[in-house]
Amino acid sequence: PEAKRRHQLFHNLTFFLSREVPRGYLELVILSYGGQVGWEGQDSPIAMDDPSITHHVVDRPTLLPSYSKLPKSRDYIQPQWVMDSANFNFVLPIDKYGVGKVLPPHLSPWVDDKEEGYVPKYKEEVERLKNGEVLESDGEAEPNGHVNSDEKTEKEEDESMSEEEVVADESNE
C-alpha cells in the first residue's frame, strides 16, 4: 500500500522544468511518483505552453516576462517543493514554495526525530496538514505561487523605515 501511494502522489499532475533547474533528479522523482514532466528543449514530450501543465518548476528570484503569455492555470514553484512533497509523501501547499519566496527548511527523510530528541517546527506543521488540519497561510503568495510584490514583508517595512521611525516604533512596543 505504501509503494502504491507513493507511485500515485503526483498522479494527474503535469510538471514543466525551466532550463535552470536540475532536470535529471527532478524528472526521476516526478515520474517515479506518477507525474508527467516536460522541459525546455526539442526532445521534451510536453511543450512549455501546454495547458495541461499544473506545476512550472522555476529556480529564479522572479518570473521571466515571457511567462506572462503562458496559460494562467499553472502554479510556479521552486524545485524544493517537488522533493519535500516526495519526502513527506504528501502534496504540500505551494504557498511557501512560490517563486522568490524564502523556502522552509529542507528536512531529511532519514533523520529519526525521536532519536535526535527534536521535531522541527515545519515537520510538525506538515504532519498537522497530513492529518487534515487547516492551517492559516502567511498570505504572502498569490494562489498561483506568484509573490505579491505590492505588499512589503515586515522585514522590508523595517528596512525602509528611517532611523527616527524605528526609534519611535520601538518605543511604542
Image (spheres, rainbow, N blue to C red):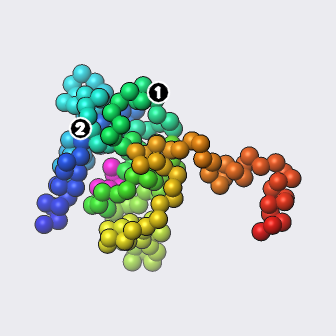
Looking at the image, residue 127 sits to the left or right of residue 146; the answer is left
Looking at the image, residue 44 sits to the left or right of residue 138; the answer is left
Identity of the residue furthest to the right in this view: 164
Q: CA distance from mark 2 to mark 1?
A: 21 Å
Residue 73 in the image: x percent, y percent? 32, 40
Residue for badge 1: 65
Q: Amino acid at mark 1?
A: Pro
Residue toward you, 126 or 113: 126
Residue 168 in the image: x percent, y percent? 84, 60
Identity of the residue furthest to the top in this view: 42
Residue at x-position 37% and y-position 71%: 133
Does residue 137 lie above or below 20 as drawn?
below
Q: Is residue 24 visible?
A: no
Quarter of image, res 26: top left
Which corner quadrant holds the N terminus? bottom left
Residue at x-position 23% and y-position 51%: 10
Bounds of the magenta span?
Answer: 82-87
Q: Magenta segment, principal secondary structure? A: helix
Residue 35 in the image: x percent, y percent? 21, 46
Q: Is residue 6 visible?
A: yes
Question: Mark 2 touching mark 1, by CB under 8 A?
Answer: no
Check residue 52 in the rendering and tell me which mark sits there, or answer none: 2
Question: Please, what secondary structure does the residue beneath circle 1 have?
Answer: helix
Question: Please, what secondary structure does the residue beneath circle 2 have?
Answer: loop
Residue at x-position 34% and y-position 52%: 83
Looking at the image, residue 111 sits to the left or right of residue 155; the answer is left
Instruction: Verify whether residue 83 appears in magenta.
Output: yes
At label 2, counting other C-alpha atoms closer than 10 Å, the crowd grade (few under 14, some 14-19, many 20 or more) is some
